[in-house]
Image (spheres, rainbow, N blue to C red):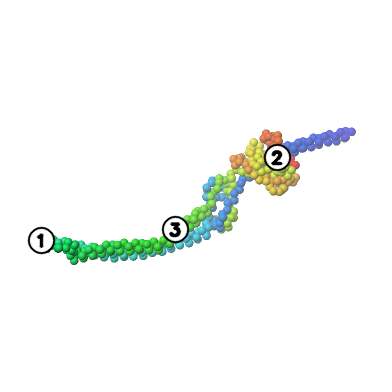
Amino acid sequence: MKRYNFIYVIGFLMLLLLSYLTMTFQSESAYFYGFAENKQTEISHDRDVLISKIHVNNGQEIRKGDLLLEVIDEEIGLKLDELEVTRESISVNNQTKIIEINNKIRQIQASKEAKMSELRSDILELEKEIELNKSLYEGLKSIESNDKEYKSPDEVKLDFLRNSLRDAATTLEREVNEQNEILKTITLPGKLKSKNISSELNHFKMMEDKLSIYAPFDGLVGTVSCKEGENISAFSSLLDLYKHNPTQVKGFVHESMILEVAVGDRLEVASTLHPKIKVTGVVIGLGSRIVEIPERLRKMADFKTYGREVIIEIPESNSFLQKEKVILNISNGDTSANSLEELLSSKNRNSKGANTKPISK
């Protein structure tokens, strides 16, 4: 009889334990685990480059705009050299033509100026001679010309010399203008080509300036995957960058709860060790298949469970550590922030006192 009663007592205790486990299971069904992680940005280049200088080390803190890597594109360097030589050749060729035409203009000017100088000298002498003759017969009344339009041979010669001087000046101006037009005709194509080459040079120089890699944001250097003097293929990883604080949470919701989480849902994210550290996150991605939940994120680590991957975006201003384990609340019922803190506190006390693991489905 006593033995019979003892079995009933054991059964009653087991029933209480089962009820407790069921209640715990139900209270925890609105939560799942994840870990905070920094957003990783892989830095690469869209061209084949040679690493010239590395300015950062693994784990180094960086600020936006800091120079990370100096690289060289040999193709751009060769193209710049080729364009410089071509532009210099065009410039020299144009300069040679300009010198030739300018020399010819100077020759024309020298020849015409010499002739005009001679004409001016002849005109001056003839004008003096005419004035002298006029002064000799000016007072003689007996010598009067009947024809007022009559010109002496010296005056006719003077008119001829003056006309010759004007013609020489006109000819000089015309010939110089002709040479200048020839100069424009000869050098214009070279100038246009030189202008085009200069534009092309500026384009490649801008590309060369953009070869160097600068920090796109404040953060930390992860792994530098290249060495100085190394040739790197286009789009190959050069280094990884991370934000200072985690910006995402990666979790796994149990397969029985996958319909309770959707993109755009707002979840409360709290540290499992420090329940008061919490933020509100937004679901930005869901896995496309059911996978095995990692041991660290299971509610019962010893039993394999399966679920769906969930990506939650959290504010950058948070106190989580990289890969810190967090708990996510998806309850739409009576569960509050206080109950979440109580649950975490209870779990922490249990883990410290009895070294037990979280209960799971």
Q: Amino acid at mark 3?
A: Lys
Q: Secondary structure at mark 2?
A: strand
Give me the residue at 41% from left, 61% from top. 188
Q: Disc 3 designates what residue?
A: 195
Describe residue 78's horizontal placement relative to residue 40 as left or right: left
Describe residue 115's horizontal placement relative to residue 208 as left or right: left
**Mark-to-mark CA distance, 1 and 2:** 141 Å
Q: Secondary structure at mark 3?
A: helix
Q: Earlier in the sequence, mark 1 or mark 3?
A: 1
Describe residue 80's horizontal placement relative to residue 148 as left or right: right
Marks 1, 3: nearer the viewer: 1
**Mark-to-mark CA distance, 1 and 3:** 77 Å
Q: Disc 1 designates what residue?
A: 141
Q: Position of residue 30 (x, y in %)?
A: 71, 39
Q: Is residue 126 visible?
A: no
- Screen quadrant of the N terminus: top right
Marks 1, 2: nearer the viewer: 1
Q: Disc 2 designates what residue?
A: 31
Q: Position of residue 263 (x, y in %)?
A: 66, 43
Q: Is residue 213 visible?
A: yes
Q: Amino acid at mark 2?
A: Tyr
Q: Position of residue 28 (x, y in %)?
A: 72, 38
Q: Earlier in the sequence, mark 2 or mark 3?
A: 2
**Mark-to-mark CA distance, 2 and 3:** 68 Å
The one of 326 and 188 positioned closer to us in this rendering:
188
- Screen quadrant of the C terminus: top right
Q: Secondary structure at mark 1?
A: loop
Q: Earlier in the sequence, mark 1 or mark 2?
A: 2
Vertical arrangement, residue 38 with respect to residue 165, above or below: above
Give me the residue at 43% from left, 62% from top. 189
